[in-house]
Amino acid sequence: MAPDAPEAAPGAGRRVLVDANVLLDVLTDDPDWYGWSAAQLDACATGAELCINPIIYAEVSVGFERIEELDEALSPDAFTRLELPWEAGFLAGKAFLQYRRAKGARSSPLPDFHIGAHAAIEGMALLTRDAKRYRTCYPKLELICP
């Protein structure tokens, strides 16, 4: 298993990293997942700071023609933009190594490895619909998932 960062202290200052799949559910009005994703975003925004990183930004960008449209959809007023810490890159590499040892087929780390590592390193919860890989690689990571 990849090492985990210490858990965040409960209470004020809670931050939630929002995975691209949740954002895309809302932005594309997904018929199956819009309701769940929108409700979770609203609930998290009430008690926490919603965050994204450049990888999440890139994953969401494929649905937009212009950066201005993307920046409006992922407004800095609604989502705090965080840089990916170097430590998260290291942790993502360790998670990827574990994946390869378990006969994973990819030859380079998937975005989810970096996203999970970022949340783990900074003690954030992760709002996602794709819990399986995160639970495997980062078992102490707080997940908000169906």
Image (cartoon, helix red, strand yellow):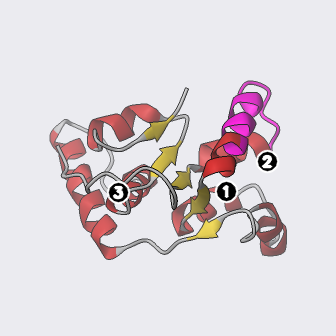
Classify 83 as above or below 99: below
**Amino acid type, label 3:** Ala
Q: Which of marks 2 and 1 is nearer the N terminus?
A: 2
Residue at the image point whose x is 19% and y is 45% from the top: 98
> SS at mark 3?
helix
What percent of the width, then of the height, locates residue 56? 57, 59
**Residue under circle 2?**
27
**Amino acid type, label 1:** Val
Q: Which of marks 1 and 3 is nearer the N terminus?
A: 1
**Residue under circle 3?**
117
**Is disc 1 surrounded by few (<14), some (14 to 19) or many (20+) residues within 10 Å?**
many
Left or right of 48 on screen, residue 62: right
The mark total stands at 3
Give the residues in magenta: 28-42
**Is disc 2 surrounded by few (<14), some (14 to 19) or many (20+) residues within 10 Å?**
some
**Residue under circle 1?**
60
Residue at the image point whose x is 37% and y is 54% from the top: 9
**Which quadrant does the N terminus fall into?**
top left
> SS at mark 1?
helix
**Which quadrant does the C terminus fall into?**
top right
> Which of the 4 image quadrants contains residue 128?
top right
For the residues labelled 1 and 3, the Cα–Cα distance comes to 19 Å
Q: Is 60 part of what is drawn in magenta? A: no
What percent of the width, then of the height, locates residue 81? 60, 71
Q: Is 33 part of what is drawn in magenta? A: yes
**Is disc 3 surrounded by few (<14), some (14 to 19) or many (20+) residues within 10 Å?**
many
Tell which of 56 and 124 is nearer to you: 124
For the residues labelled 2 and 3, the Cα–Cα distance comes to 25 Å
